Amino acid sequence: MDPVQLVTPAGELCEHPDVEGRIEPELCRAMFRAMVLARRFDTEAFALQRQGELGLWLQCHGQEAAQVGSTTALRSTDYVFPSYREHAAALVRGITPAQLLVQWRGNAHSGWDPEAYRFHVYTLVLAAQLLHATGYARGVQLDGAEEVVLAYFGDGASSEGDTSEAFNFAAVADAPVVFFCQNNQWAIPTPTSAQARTPLHERARGFGLRTMVVDGNDVLAVHAVTTQLAEHARSGSGPARCAHTRRGGAAAGRDGRAAVPRLQRGRHLPGRALRRPRHARGGRPPHVRHGHAAGRRPEVQHQPRLDPQRGTAVGRAHHEVLSSLGCSTDQIAEMQDKGVI
């Protein structure tokens, strides 16, 4: 099955026989702005983790179009169940950078009210959110509400037993849930070819789910496909599954491995194409060369805390970044008070 595509890699609009996209200037500008903000926020959060200000950060670099396009296609009353790197989707739902960073700082289990944003808390246990999403969708169905549940997961999570259970239960119950697989072809170092003998979308079809494959770097195609599948589930026709995307960063902020190999970068996304660093092409990661593999943790150079009034270069730079993300001076001060930064 070829991925649905409405924008070519060269940036030219194209047509698809089964999917009609919305080419509206206001919608396109809103989605592009959301992708740019997500990329910049993700880059800054990754830097904070490297400086020791965050305990962990799981990047969404390269998945902005998939998340922005799919979340924008939902109604405000629909409910989203993320995994742990859906930062672009969270920003689209109105969650602020400060609220997102609280958990990764270790100050709270979550920084936002899930019911207020219709966006569940992050789930770090692989595929656990799919069972939660299916159960919630079943409740929506019994209530007779016109809601749809969108659940994100990755190709690595598809190997978990919870995924199969969620697919089967959702299909048998005709639950109004859309499973969105962000398949970048790699589960940390494991390629999909080592996880399954058949394409992941074919496995979902075997459970009775309607399945579509979309170019995850084409935000217009993602928006159109998600809209179609959401209405399919909302009409009572049963659950659906959508795939796939690309990711350009490491699997985790503390992972010595860098960019995912053999992927095309920068298509329909903010930013340039990335090339894997030398150690990702076969050499040892820097922390291994410096003795981390022998049990000695590398020294972390802690940067000054964010304080624009202090006048330091770091403080001014961080203040400018957060200001560019739309944070006011009061919001930046709130982040400091909560110990987020």
Image (tube, rainbow, N blue to C red):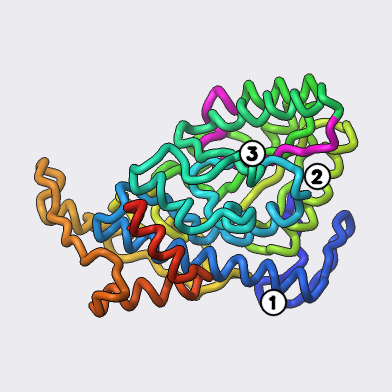
Q: Is residue 301 above or below residue 149?
A: below
Disc 2 residue type (three-letter): Leu
Residue type of the residue flagged with mark 3: Glu
Mark nearer the viewer, 3 or 1:
3
Sequence-earlier tag: 3 or 1:
1
Q: Are marks 3 and 1 in contact (CB under 8 Å)?
A: no
Check the picture and name the quadrant holding the C terminus.
bottom left
The residue wearing badge 2 is 229
Whole-percent x, y for residue 22 in the image: 84, 65
Q: Label 1 is placed on what type of residue?
A: Gly
Relative to 221, residue 198 above or below? above
Q: Which residue is mark 3?
A: 115
User: What residue is shown with label 1?
Assistant: 11
Comparing labels 2 and 1, the label whose residue is closer to the camera: 2
Q: Is residue 214 rendered to the left or right of residue 245?
A: right
Q: CA distance from mark 3 to mark 2?
A: 23 Å
Expressed as whole percent of the image width and height from the top left, the position of residue 131 reads: 61, 26
The answer to which quarter of the image holds residue 318 is bottom left
Residue 162, disc? none
Q: Secondary structure at mark 2?
A: helix
Let me know if residue 309 appears in the view: yes
Q: Dot 1, how many residues are within 10 Å of its Cα: few (below 14), some (14-19), or many (20+)?
A: few
What residue span does the magenta drawing correspond to?
A: 145-163
Examine the rendered structure and indicate whether residue 207 appears above or below residue 295: above
Give the percent coordinates (x, y) of residue 170: 73, 25
